[in-house]
Amino acid sequence: MANINDIAKRAGVSVSTVSRVLNHHPYVSESKRAAVQRVIDEMDYTPNRLAVDLIRKETRKIGVIMPYNNNQAFDQLLHGVLNRSVELDYTVMVLPTKYDPDREHSCLNMLKNKQLDGIIITSRSNGWEAITPYTKYGTIVACEYTDHPEIGCAYMDRYASYLETFQMLKDKGHTRVAFTTARGEESNSTQLTIKAYQQVFGDLPSEYHIRDCYDMDDGARAAQQLLHLESRPTAVYANGDEVAAGLYQYGKSIELGVPADLAIIGQENQPIGIALRLSTVDHQLVKVGEQAFDLAIEKSKDKVEIPYRIIERYSI
């Protein structure tokens, strides 16, 4: 099997020149680069990537911690990361955790073991006090706002988006408004949703908050619980367009008019929402993922806000 010394001898250059070519070093003449590349092709040489990584002190791999990948919101974040990784020739390792704190720690240990250059956290189960010690081993970027000085973040102002959405529904005459979330109050996103609701409407009736909603079936389940209440809500803010679609389909099945009897707004401007003409809050998660990737490879601790937008369609 050919090695770097064989290539140098046949190409008539030094071993260090071959090393520079393999590592894409800019200070190599085009004639020498071409000669080395020709020999590499002739000898069908494949460099030992681990050895190259050790020399460069980087892996060109970024890990993405996400609880699961059967969710449109997390898929959009990952799509943004992959967009940039392909452009910049990086490898992305998806690290699903199912919100298991121990599994999340195992993923973070990959920084300590030099298996990754950085980690992007799309959603977390551990508190920041458990995560921040890992920043001494590599770059950590969050997809939510954190004021920790050692962690960069690409984020959207979720609280402002929730507040504006609830206020919009109130301005349209709705006083009985329900909402769905993926997780309970252990989730920062759920806490912000509740806080925004209370600021606009006051006390939250417990039956107006439906948890564990991820897809159309969950949306239908939420609708079944909400739309047969004695004090039925006249509007529902769903935590995703798939959930909103389930609400919509169930509402139609019991002959409720949308939006006359039931206003519905979802999140993330997903294809099913576009097809059903559902209003949505677009947090522009693809852009968030792209920006998070850029921060990770730049080893940046900047805080970059991506603007959200509310898209009004047929359903409100």
Image (spheres, rainbow, N blue to C red):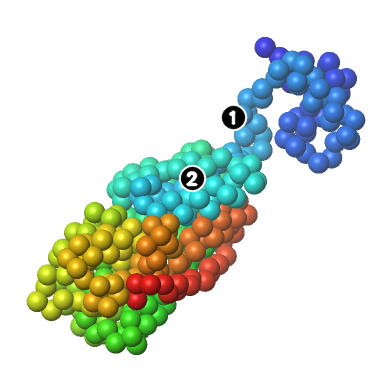
- Residue 121 position, x and y percent, is 44, 54
Q: Can residue 130 be seen from the camera position used here? A: no
Q: Which residue is mark 2?
A: 63
Q: Considering only order in the chain, which callout, 1 or 2, is on the residue closer to the N terminus?
A: 1
Nearest the viewer among 133 and 289 is: 289
Q: Which residue is mark 1?
A: 50
Q: Label 1: few (<14), some or many (≥20) within 10 Å? A: few
Q: Can residue 228 be seen from the camera position used here? A: yes
Q: Name the residue located 36 percent from the left edge and 52 percent from the top edge.
A: 71
- Residue 185 position, x and y percent, is 25, 66
Q: Name the residue located 25 percent from the left edge and 73 percent from the top edge.
A: 257
| Left or right of 130 in this view: 14 | right
Q: Name the residue located 31 percent from the left edge and 47 percent from the top edge.
A: 98
Q: SS of the residue at dot 2?
A: strand
Q: Give me the disc on residue 222.
A: none
For discs 2 and 1, the disc positioned in front in the rendered view = 2
